[in-house]
Amino acid sequence: MPFDSHIHLGRLPHPRELALILAESGYAYNAVACEPEEWESQWELWQNLDLKGKGCNLAFGIHPMSVGHAKEGYKQELRKFLERNDRFQVGETGLDRRFPEYGPGELQEQWFLFQAKLALELKRDLQIHCVGDYGRVIALLKQVGFGKSSNGSRPIFHRFGGDVGAARQIVNMGGLISVHQSSLAKKSSQKAVAELPKEVLLFETDADETFWSAEDLNGTPAIVAELVAQRLLDTLGNVRETAENL
Ligand SMILES: [Zn+2]
């Protein structure tokens, strides 16, 4: 089973039972908590179920959708969660043109820069959410020091939707590309994914409450676990098909 590089475990129903079932089936993942309200419960799950021993990891951050109500005190709190394990990732953070405060210098950018710098300082991978301007996100990463002296801190472009040019720049910065099923919807991203070396590709479900409601409202954790695993395998299969057909 491939590794799921981005899943919102805490937003799926019965996360504890689901995590147990996934662990028993050997499904390893990176669980993303990108709302401050999710940090503590994610941490508890991690500890109680020994998710580390199951090959899983966590990311803590603030999503661009949530920066409007982000408080200054979250910065210190975020750091505290990240310092609990030296592999925890930062994010997801980034820019999304669909949400307020998207412009240069505005709140989304301020919180993105803060988290990018924190990732560099703590030598952590950075989960990046980008809907809109790949050029601007890449330029901001370079501005804070990614690419030159990344210190083992890699930008991971979650749910990649960029083109070949963006993908090459990301790889040159030492970054990784995380492929979601939606990454294959656009011809330009398909081409990018097909031409990249395998070592820089990750796969993800990005499963959250929307995944759940779209799939099966009355499912048990066992059914959700199966759907999640199936989604990841489908994505992998689609990537192989795309590469063969291009
Ligand atoms: Zn996500």
Image: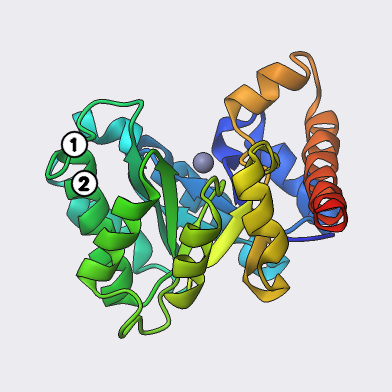
Q: Which amino acid lies under the numbered mark 2 shown in the image of this protein?
A: Glu
**63 left or right of 229?**
left
In what quadrant of the picture does the N terminus appear?
bottom right
- Residue, disc 2: 109
- Where residue 12 appears, x then y in whole percent? 63, 31
Which is in the foreground here, disc 1 or disc 2?
Answer: 1
Scheme by which the image is coloured: rainbow
Name the residue located 56 percent from the left edge and 56 percent from the top edge.
46
For the residue pair 208 and 50, the one nearer the viewer reads as: 208
Name the residue located 78 percent from the left edge and 18 percent from the top edge.
216
Q: Which amino acid lies under the numbered mark 1 shown in the image of this protein?
A: Gly
106 vs 243: above or below? above
165 vs 63: above or below? below
Name the residue located 42 percent from the left edge and 44 percent from the top edge.
130
- Where residue 153 appears, x then y in whole percent? 40, 75
Question: Is residue 104 something that shows in the picture?
Answer: yes
Question: Is residue 49 something that shows in the picture?
Answer: no
- In which quarter of the view is residue 90 placed? bottom left
**43 left or right of 147?**
right
- Where residue 141 appears, x then y in whole percent? 30, 64
Q: From mark 1 to mark 2, how far is it between C-alphas?
A: 8 Å
Q: Rate crowding at label 2 as few (under 14), some (14 to 19) or many (20 or more) other CA atoms within 10 Å.
A: many
- Where residue 183 appears, x then y in whole percent? 63, 43
For the residue pair 241 and 41, the one nearer the viewer reads as: 241
Q: Earlier in the sequence, mark 1 or mark 2?
A: 1
Q: Are marks 1 and 2 in contact (CB under 8 Å)?
A: yes
- Residue, disc 1: 103
- In which quarter of the view is residue 205 placed? top right
